[in-house]
Amino acid sequence: MQTRHAVWWSWGKMLGGALALLVVVGVAREGAHAAATVPQMTSTTPALSGQVGDQVVASVVETGVRTGASVMVLLQLRDAAGTVVAQTSGLVSEGAPLRVSYQATSAGGLRAFASAPKDGPQFSAAVLTIERWSTSPTPPTPPQHCVYPMPEPTPRPNGPVTVGYCLPPLPEDG
């Protein structure tokens, strides 16, 4: 028969071991999370609104030939709240663009977002585009598209550089 002291001692050992295991697992998980965080280059287009049922396509296209690199890209379509409504990932190179398409479930704005690792192969002159056009016969909204560099350029000392455009031009609050 065990004494009360022996029972408490074995429970204490068991709890101490469990606590040590939790600490080790927590540290390992945090370390893995920190190791998985890779610096990213990103680009985002303005939001395009239209009608329910519109076809929306986002693309990352390498327009340059300098590096000849294939770059792994995450491409998303996001709604006004930032919720991802469509997503794909894959390699982008001079002859292989990456595209994701979505049929709009609301008239609200959708924007394209692309992300690629800063380390490793780099783009020569990639662009992120978003297109939205009506599939409704009446009344169709005119097709819209935006083209933005990938990655977005960093501002110069004398101010930001804007090299993206939308057609037709978006309203100032767009």
Image (spheres, rainbow, N blue to C red):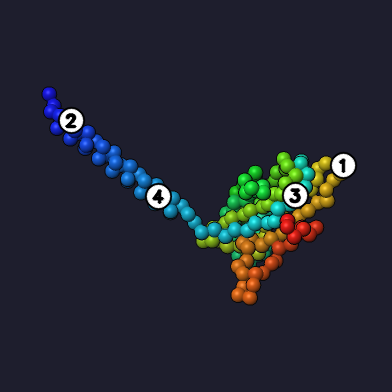
Amino acid, disc 4: Glu
Are dots 2 and 4 in contact, CB under 8 Å?
no
Amino acid, disc 2: Val
Residue drawn where x is 59% and y is 51% of the image: 74
Q: Secondary structure at mark 4?
A: helix
Whether residue 50 is situated above or below residue 173 in the rendered picture: above
Instruction: Give the Cα distance between marks 1 and 3.
Output: 17 Å
Residue nearest the viewer, comparing 4 with 134: 4
Q: Which residue is mark 3?
A: 49
Q: Which residue is mark 4?
A: 30
Q: Position of residue 30 (x, y in %)?
A: 40, 50
Are dots 1 and 4 in contact, CB under 8 Å?
no
Horizontal side of 12 relative to 149 (left or right) equals left
Residue nearest the viewer, comparing 32 with 104: 104
For marks 2 and 4, the one nearer the N-term is: 2
Amino acid, disc 1: Thr
For marks 4 and 3, the one nearer the N-term is: 4
Q: Secondary structure at mark 3?
A: loop
Q: Which residue is mark 1?
A: 138
For marks 2 and 1, the one nearer the N-term is: 2
Q: Nearer the viewer, mark 2 or mark 4?
A: 2
Q: Give the position of the C terminus as an image quadrant.
A: bottom right
For marks 1 and 3, the one nearer the N-term is: 3
Q: Nearer the viewer, mark 2 or mark 1?
A: 2
Whether residue 108 is situated above or below residue 147 in the rendered picture: above
For marks 3 and 2, the one nearer the N-term is: 2
Are dots 1 and 3 in contact, CB under 8 Å?
no
Residue 7 image label: 2
Res 58 visible: no
Q: Position of residue 78 (x, y in %)?
A: 65, 48
Residue nearest the viewer, comparing 145 with 81: 81
Whether residue 120 is situated above or below residue 24 in the rendered picture: below
